[in-house]
Image: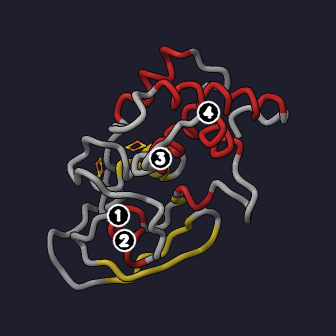
Amino acid sequence: MTGLPPAGASPAPAGAPRLIQLRVNGEARSGVAEPRTLLSDFIRHELGLTGTHVGCEQGACGSCTVLVDGELTLSCLALAVQAEGREVETVEGLAHGSRLHPIQQAFQTKHGLQCGFCTPGMLIATRALLADTPDPGEQQIREHLSGNVCRCTGYTGIVEAVLEAARLLGERGEPGA
Ligand code: FES
Ligand code: FES
């Protein structure tokens, strides 16, 4: 999991703010960003989607994880301008109204969170894992989530939650959805 490679021309290191148009959680969105604005700040402050958390701001904790065109991306290492024209998915895109996504249900029932700070990144990372690997083993889960730091749970509940999410999705006939 990394930041984003440049989309087309490299963004200028400095310059005037400009309008960024993209899709977020299936909807067309736009907002103003300077060339140096981080994607994490753009998502939180310009688009108002504060479910994406920011911890270390240096790519070490995973709390800012989002999907960009389906790829796991650390939004603190990406620039907003790099998301121009792309599809971004944040934790807000998981639930449908008051109905939790099976991954969220599983984290709830298996106690995959305590303070919740790491949780948005964990949920998005889990979504990416199950999209590629609908029936992962414990070791695969631990390796996949190794870039997402949790200071509370000791990870056991998180691993159980991912296994439960895989089971729920399989039961619904939507493995990896
Ligand atoms: S805030 Fe992005 S990895 Fe920690
Ligand atoms: S639940 Fe607190 S950091 Fe993970």
Residue hosting label 3: 119
Of labels 3 and 2, the one closer to you: 3
Q: Amino acid at mark 1?
A: Leu
Q: Residue at (23%, 54%) from the top-left corner?
A: 57
| Cα gap from disc 4 to disc 2, whole angstroms | 32 Å
Depth-wise, is mark 4 or mark 3 nearer the camera?
4
Residue at point 37%, 28% (across, down) = 146
Neighbor class of circle 2 (other Cα within 10 Å; few <14, some 14-19, many 20+) is: many
Q: Do tag 3 and tag 2 residues touch (Cβ < 8 Å)?
A: no
Q: Are the residues tagged 2 and 1 within 8 Å (C-beta)?
A: yes
Residue carrying label 2: 42
Res. 97 mark: none
Hey, which residue is sitting farthest left in the picture? 14
Q: Which residue is mark 1?
A: 39
- Decide which of tag 3 and tag 2 comes sooner along the chain: 2
Tell me if label 4 and label 2 are in contact, CB under 8 Å.
no
Please give the count of numbered marks on the rendered protein.
Answer: 4
Q: Label 1, label 4: how many angstroms apart (C-alpha)?
A: 31 Å
Quarter of the view holding residue 54: bottom left
- Asked whether mark 3 lies closer than 8 Å to ligand 2, one says yes
Q: Position of residue 158 (x, y in %)?
A: 51, 31
Q: Secondary structure at mark 4?
A: loop
Q: Which of the two labelled residues, at mark 3 and mark 1, occupies the earlier sequence position?
A: 1
Q: Amino acid at mark 3?
A: Thr
Question: Residue 115 in the image: x percent, y percent?
Answer: 42, 49
Where residue 75 appears, x then y in whole percent? 35, 55
- Contact between marks 1 and 4 (CB within 8 A): the answer is no
Q: CA distance from mark 2 to mark 1?
A: 5 Å
Question: Which residue sits at x=66%, y=38%?
Answer: 109
Classed neighbour count for the residue bearing mark 1: other residues with Cα under 10 Å, few (<14), some (14–19), many (≥20): many
In the displayed structure image, the side of residue 82 where residue 109 appears, left or right:
right
Locate the N terminus and report the quarter of the image it occupies.
top left
